[in-house]
């Protein structure tokens, strides 16, 4: 090799290597010896005793102590697999596969397959497998099964009492993924009527009390760690570009520090690929003078899920990708966020597993102290709960009050999940937005609708209005409202126009549009486009059929319908309430008779924001279970002509109308 770096590996490569190794090898004595050196080994018998005595056990042990790979094997050796299998959840697909590969190797069986050896294992056919979405590497002979937490959730569908399992180990509980949190509820419930089921909750962090509390005071089994000191270095000033800083640090470590492998934490695949490119480029010229060292580029999966041996240096840029939910727009997105102190500690810990190590944090000590949260907020607190409800529904949990989901036809009158609901559940969005997208299939305008959904998710940070150029800015904005198309179609026009300029920044400046917001909208749109395919919605475009697009919008938002009153104010149709069109709306001066709105904001009064005009008979056509003709008839004689509405609605008239309404 020309490069002094032995090789820069990403997660996939590591995984491939493990799989190859495991396929090639039979049980080696060396592996059996290695098992005995793990911290957990000394506690094997105590652990088995505790499992025997308690139905639920919380297990705490540092990353790399052997929880994931050893506990299922110990239980197997103790006979827990005679009647049924052991299931162990992981948070990530790659972790489930890698750990299964390792365990099959340790046990001398071929992953997922029978071991056709003539040797001493003839009577010892064992099976270790894994199950992740789109890939089931198990058979009916599998006795130790690693799987993502999401897959175990799905198993509840076909097997609500998990009768095929004698032990369920909810591993990496500290990660608090959404699926794990839901699993807690489900397994706790099962454990009550399946007294023979053993439940293990394992965690890499010490604050396991809350798990114990949740499981009615289940005992906590601690595996004392073995950790060497790790020197922590902070930068003296914040880094402008952490990717670049990470690469410089890798090269500095390589040149100035003693032998030992380097682990770098990035937020995702794109970053890993970019860093990989640059590193390969920059190390190409280096002379082969020094000892080779390995550089592992990983996501935060290397924090606690995967143990990589031989790491002496950790580089922690301080960021990770995290799902966040904006309850105002109902939109979930994956954003790059600062990590928590707990994560930073875990990352540093990766450097001290086999000897003293060093951790280079690419942020300042001040940042660490003042800006990082203590712990990462559990996913369930930053996710769209409507979606959780759909998941629970699809798991057959029925006693939930779900009027909106019923109205959207996601549930039928018996409260069961419908086909529409199943498709909606795939979108990480508020149900009304998901419904709008699912409905766009019918109206042949999915391309337009996902653009609108993406733009809606940005909230009101699209247009800006500099103090000295307000008139210009307002004119630019009103250009998108030509023909009083309504706010949704105006948003679409903004997006389309930007796309036509090939996503030009200059164009954004000229139109008083925030380029950052637009880029976010584009990212979200890309995500939604991928999901269309997953739920088999064809990508169709119907740009000149405004009514088709509006009908798709109405299919999601008919719940948000309002009707103009004689006073000039609006009244919501269901649960009547007086509301107004937000002054920023393109329809604020137009006052159409019937509108649907995206959201309600309360400032000085209740305002509907992002408003589109509809025809009332659409409501009956689109949501016949929800609207009848009598709901949408214009109270007989006293129709107010459109022109009159407009005439009375000059600036300030909204206030007057509201005052009038208040005095009635
Ligand atoms: P824990 O779950 O407590 O973090 P693990 O059981 O995952 O610990 O790992 C125990 C040890 O097994 C690790 O220190 C590592 O040496 C070894 N190991 C685990 N997975 C693999 C793998 N895929 N390839 C090689 N070694 C592994
Ligand atoms: Mg583990």
Image (cartoon, rainbow, N blue to C red):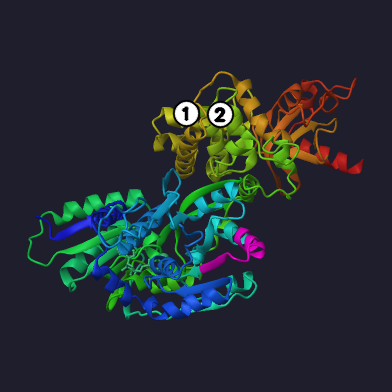
Q: Mark 2 vs mark 1: give the one in front.
A: 1
For label 2, the residue is 480
Q: Residue at x 48, y 62 (%)?
A: 82
Cα distance, mark 2 to mark 1?
A: 9 Å
The magenta span reads: 186-201
Task: Name the image quarter holding the N terminus.
Answer: bottom left
- Residue 200 on the magenta span: yes
Residue drawn at x 23%, y 63% is 250
Q: Which corner quadrant of the figure contains ligand 2?
A: bottom left
The quadrant in which residue 411 appears is top right
User: Percent position (x, y) of residue 662?
Assistant: 87, 43
Q: Would residue 453 be found to the left or right of residue 97 on screen?
A: right
Q: Which residue is mark 1?
A: 497
In this view, the residue in front, 332 or 652, is: 332
Give me the residue at 58% from left, 74% from top.
54
Considering the numbered disc 2 on the image, is that residue within a helix, a strand or a loop? loop
Residue 236 in percent (x, y) is at 33, 72
Residue 57 seen in the current view: yes
Q: Residue 105's x, y, as percent?
A: 30, 60
Residue 508, quarter of picture: top left
Dot 1 lies on which element? helix
Q: Residue furthest right?
A: 664
Q: Is residue 533 magenta?
A: no
């Amino acid at each position: 090799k020309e490069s002094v770096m032995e090789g820069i590996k990403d997660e996939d490569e590591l995984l491939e290597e493990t799989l190859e190794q495991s396929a090639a090898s039979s049980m080696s004595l060396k592996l059996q010896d290695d098992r005995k050196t793990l911290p957990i080994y000394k506690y094997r018998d105590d652990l088995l005793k505790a499992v025997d005595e308690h139905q639920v056990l919380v297990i705490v042990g540092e990353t790399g102590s052997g929880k994931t790979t050893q506990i299922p094997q110990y239980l197997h050796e103790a006979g827990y697999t005679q009647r049924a299998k052991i299931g162990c959840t992981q948070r990530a697909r790659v972790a489930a596969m890698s750990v299964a590969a390792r365990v099959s190797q340790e046990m001398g069986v071929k992953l997922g397959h029978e071991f056709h050896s003539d040797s001493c294992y003839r009577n010892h056919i064992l099976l270790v497998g894994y199950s992740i979405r789109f890939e089931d590497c198990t058979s009916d002979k599998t006795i130790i099964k690693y799987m993502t937490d999401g897959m175990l959730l799905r198993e509840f569908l076909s097997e609500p009492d998990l009768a095929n399992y004698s032990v369920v180990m909810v591993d990496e509980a500290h990660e608090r993924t959404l699926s794990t949190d839901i699993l807690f509820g489900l397994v706790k419930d099962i454990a009550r009527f399946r007294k023979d089921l053993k439940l293990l909750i394992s965690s890499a962090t010490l604050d396991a009390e809350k798990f114990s509390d949740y499981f009615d005071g289940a005992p906590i089994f601690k595996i004392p760690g073995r950790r060497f000191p790790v020197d922590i270095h902070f930068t003296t000033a914040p880094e402008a570009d952490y990717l670049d800083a990470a690469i410089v640090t890798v090269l500095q470590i390589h040149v100035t520090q003693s032998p030992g492998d380097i682990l770098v934490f990035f937020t995702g695949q794109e970053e890993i690929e970019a860093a990989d490119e640059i590193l390969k480029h920059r190390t190409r010229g280096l002379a082969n003078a020094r000892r080779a060292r390995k550089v592992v580029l990983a996501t935060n999966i290397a924090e606690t899920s995967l143990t990589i041996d031989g790491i002496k240096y950790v580089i922690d840029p301080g960021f990770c990708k995290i799902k966040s939910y904006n309850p105002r727009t109902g939109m979930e997105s994956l954003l790059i966020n600062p990590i928590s102190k707990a994560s930073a500690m875990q990352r540093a810990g990766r450097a001290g597993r086999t000897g003293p190590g060093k951790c280079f944090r690419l942020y300042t000590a001040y940042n660490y102290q003042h800006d990082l949260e203590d712990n990462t907020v559990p996913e369930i607190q930053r996710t769209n709960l409507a979606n959780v409800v759909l998941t629970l529904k699809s798991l057959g949990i029925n006693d939930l009050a779900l009027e909106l989901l019923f109205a959207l036809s996601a549930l039928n009158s018996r409260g069961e999940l419908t086909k529409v609901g199943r498709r909606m559940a795939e979108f990480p969005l508020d149900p009304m937005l998901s419904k709008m997208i699912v409905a766009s299939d019918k109206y042949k305008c999915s391309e337009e609708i996902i653009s609108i959904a993406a733009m809606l998710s940005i909230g009101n940070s699209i247009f800006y209005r500099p103090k000295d150029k307000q008139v210009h800015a307002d004119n630019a904005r009103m250009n998108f409202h030509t023909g009083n198309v309504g706010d949704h179609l105006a948003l679409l026009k903004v997006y389309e126009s930007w796309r036509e300029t090939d996503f030009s920044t200059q164009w954004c400046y000229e139109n008083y549009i925030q380029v950052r917001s637009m880029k976010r909208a584009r990212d979200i749109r890309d995500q939604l486009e991928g999901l269309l395919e997953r739920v088999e919605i064809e990508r169709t475009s119907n740009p000149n059929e405004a009514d088709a697009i509006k009908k798709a919008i109405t299919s999601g938002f008919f719940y948000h319908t309002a009707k103009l009153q004689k006073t000039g104010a609006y009244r919501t149709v269901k649960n009547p309430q007086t509301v107004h069109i937000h002054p920023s709306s393109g329809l604020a001066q137009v006052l159409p008779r019937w509108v649907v709105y995206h959201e309600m904001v309360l400032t000085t009064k209740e305002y509907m924001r992002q408003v589109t005009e509809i025809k009332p008979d659409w409501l009956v056509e689109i949501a016949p279970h929800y609207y009848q003709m009598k709901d949408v008839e214009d109270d007989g004689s006293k129709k107010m002509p459109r022109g009159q509405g407009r005439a009375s609605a000059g600036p300030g008239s909204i206030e007057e109308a509201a005052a009038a309404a208040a005095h009635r």
